[in-house]
Amino acid sequence: KSVPLFVEARVAPLAEKHGFTNVTALAPWESASVGGVTITAAPAKHQVDEVTFVLSDGDRTVYFAGDTEYVAELEELPRRFPRIDLALVPTNGLRIRPLLNKQIVMDARQAARLVALLGATNAMPHHYAFTSGPIGNALLTKSDPNPEHFVAAVRELSPATSVRVTAPGQRVEF
């Protein structure tokens, strides 16, 4: 539990409570470095304000969107990071049924729009395999489990971006 852990400020006390000893809290646009990699928090929202992360070693830059909604503040990313080599974006459009189908995660088209805005060289969808289980899917959540919807949207909105779809847990090297 001594590995460096970079989190949104509200998460830091929880991480420490669970025994993590090397926790750095980051607010949007704050940065920290470890092992030659700079980690910059970017804005996010997943029912509450959160952060996403940009990781850069000076040669390559990766954007990890976590499970955010598409928020206007993300449109600042290309100005701050003019080159994104890989964008990892959620694509399932997760909605909460009891909250009148409130969307809390980007859908495939919103994720493709963000990839196009970033001018990402490569993109990978994630979060599409999320499940609440058979009962939860029927009563609590609704989502799009098909990553090919993202592939098609990127093909249309950002044709120069290469998309790679992987199975959960599959190792990928770029």
Image (tube, helix red, strand yellow):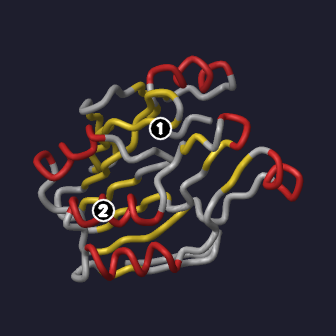
Seen at 31% across and 59% down, the residue is 62
Residue type at mark 1 is: Pro
- Residue at 18% x, 43% y is 76
* Structural crowding at the residue carrying mark 1, measured as other residues with C-alpha within 10 Å and reported as few (<14), some (14–19) or many (≥20): some
Q: What kind of residue is marked 2?
A: Arg
Q: Is residue 146 above or below residue 109?
A: below
Res 42 visible: yes
Quarter holding the C terminus is: bottom left
Q: What's the residue at 66%, 19% (across, down)?
A: 17
**Looking at the picture, how far across and down is residue 103, in whole percent?**
54, 45
Question: Where residue 33 sits: x, y (%)?
Answer: 29, 39
The residue lying furthest to the front in this view is: 100
Q: Is residue 156 left or right of residue 67?
A: left
Count residues near mark 2 (Cα–Cα under 10 Å), then give few for <14, some for 14-19, many for 20+: some
Q: In the image, what residue occupies the spot 45% across and 21% down?
A: 9
As drawn, the label of residue 113 is 2
In this view, the residue in front, 142 or 7, is 142
Nearer to us of marks 2 and 1 is 2
Q: Quick check: marks 2 and 1 in contact, CB under 8 Å?
A: no
Q: Which of the 4 image quarters holds residue 122?
A: bottom left
Report whether 54 appears left or right of 20. Answer: left
Q: Position of residue 92 (x, y in %)?
A: 56, 60
Left or right: 49, with 85 as reference point: right
- In the rendered image, the vertical position of residue 31 relative to residue 171, given as above or below: above
Element at label 2? helix
One can see residue 169 in this view: no
Question: What residue sits right under mark 1 in the picture?
Answer: 4
